[in-house]
Image: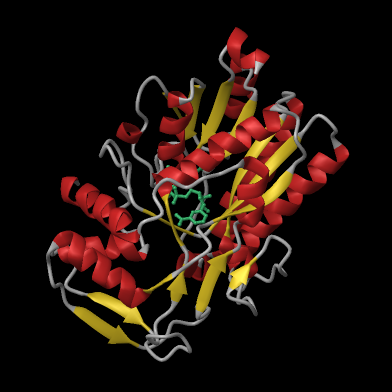
Amino acid sequence: MLEKENSMPKILVTGGAGYIGSHTTLALCEAGYEVVVYDNLSTGKAEAVLPPARLVVGDLAQTEALDRLMTKEKFSAVLHFAGSIVVPESVENPLKYYMNNTNNTTELIRLAVKNAIPRFVFSSTAAVYGMPDTAAVTEDSPTKPINPYGRTKLMSEWVIEDTAAAHADFSFVILRYFNVAGADPKGRIGQSTPDATHLIKVASQAALGRRDALHIFGTDYDTPDGTCIRDYIHVSDLAAAHVLALGHLEAGNPAGIFNCGYGHGYSVRDIVSAVKEASGVDFPVIESPRRAGDPPALISDPTRIRATMNWKPAHDDIHAIALSAYRWEMRL
Ligand SMILES: NC(=O)c1ccc[n+]([C@@H]2O[C@H](COP(=O)([O-])OP(=O)(O)OC[C@H]3O[C@@H](n4cnc5c(N)ncnc54)[C@H](O)[C@@H]3O)[C@@H](O)[C@H]2O)c1
């Protein structure tokens, strides 16, 4: 806390022009941090980086530029969001994912250690759990990713853990996100990627006529209505979890891995209903065959983050999530 009062800690946010990074940048600025975003704008948007945060346009692979930035700015932490995130693309083009996720994360960690940046917060994913045997997964559930995307993120986790084990002055929080959805409730930012695959975003696009229909992939799962169940977390609650994670490390607490979800789920049909209600549009829905690799249900056990960081979600309401996503989509 003393450090915070004397001078605002300066945070490097990679991928801060993207969906989750921009919401977290906003939350960090509101909490009084100074934020520098480093982003190549491959999927992110410069206008998503709201002042007073500063945007430096650059690629993680430009390690010399990144090194110079770290040397100049003297960051107290790195929050690492930048990466490639589309699962089917990772199957078709795995090397893109190993390069951008695993390699670039490894380089970023190398530079953080070199520049004596003591804290690292990493965007991981429920995809590291693969097809879990139980619906609600804890951080100790087996990690068995079933696609290159999940594997590149799990490998990044290992690099972080092994680095921290070898360097006493490097600590981390790994956050494993479940299904991130919604937009800033004040409407300042939202998810802008045009070809996003996230269900609530795609349903909002269908409601606005930007897609002909919404596909439900699989209606014969062993779930109450036959469609897959997921744990949807509002992006602003996730952003708040990052601010807590940073405070957790600043207070000298141990490194750790934390699930980020609400601990309960909604089916695809529930989501379709929520977006139809939010939009007032009865958009067409096409029932399609299952996709490979979709577990019937994937729900977090968020006990650890609640108990350790006192994380209290403020937006655990699927109708509010759908409404914020739809309102943002209308503005695009
Ligand atoms: N969206 C989800 O539901 C979800 C779920 C689990 C985990 N995650 C993780 O959260 C992180 C952020 O995801 P998002 O949904 O905000 O995606 P996004 O595509 O909106 O954001 C990623 C950002 O990183 C930037 N970027 C990508 N490669 C870069 C590079 N080489 N150099 C510099 N910048 C680069 C992009 O321009 C973009 O601004 C990712 O690491 C992703 O794996 C997302």
Give the farthest residue toward the bottom.
220
In the picture shown, does residue 263 fall above or below 185? below
> Which residue lies at the image location 60% right of the left edge and 16% below the top edge?
4
- The total of numbered circles placed on residues is 0
Kindly identify the residue that appears in the image at 49 percent across and 20 percent down: 32
Q: Relative to the observer, which residue lies in front, 79 or 274? A: 274
Residue found farthest to the top: 6
Q: Is any part of residue 218 visible from this angle?
A: yes
Q: Residue 299 at x, y = what percent?
A: 54, 68
Q: Is residue 103 visible?
A: no
Q: Nearer the viewer, residue 196 or 201?
A: 201
Report the residue at 41% width, 31% height from top.
Answer: 26
User: Horizontal and vertical percent for residue 92?
Assistant: 50, 70
**Percent x, y of residue 199:** 34, 66
> 130 left or right of 86?
right
Task: Return the residue nearer the eye: 65 or 226.
Answer: 226
Q: Position of residue 259 (x, y in %)?
A: 61, 55
Name the colouring of the figure: secondary structure
Residue at screen point 47% across, 47% down: 313
Task: Please give left or right for residue 205 compared with residue 234 in the image.
Answer: left
Quadrant for residue 133, please give it: bottom right
**Picture quarter with the N terminus:** top right
When the figure is inspected, residue 240 is found, relative to residue 1, above or below; the finding is: below
Q: Is residue 149 shown left or right of residue 139?
A: left
Q: Quadrant of residue 29?
A: top left
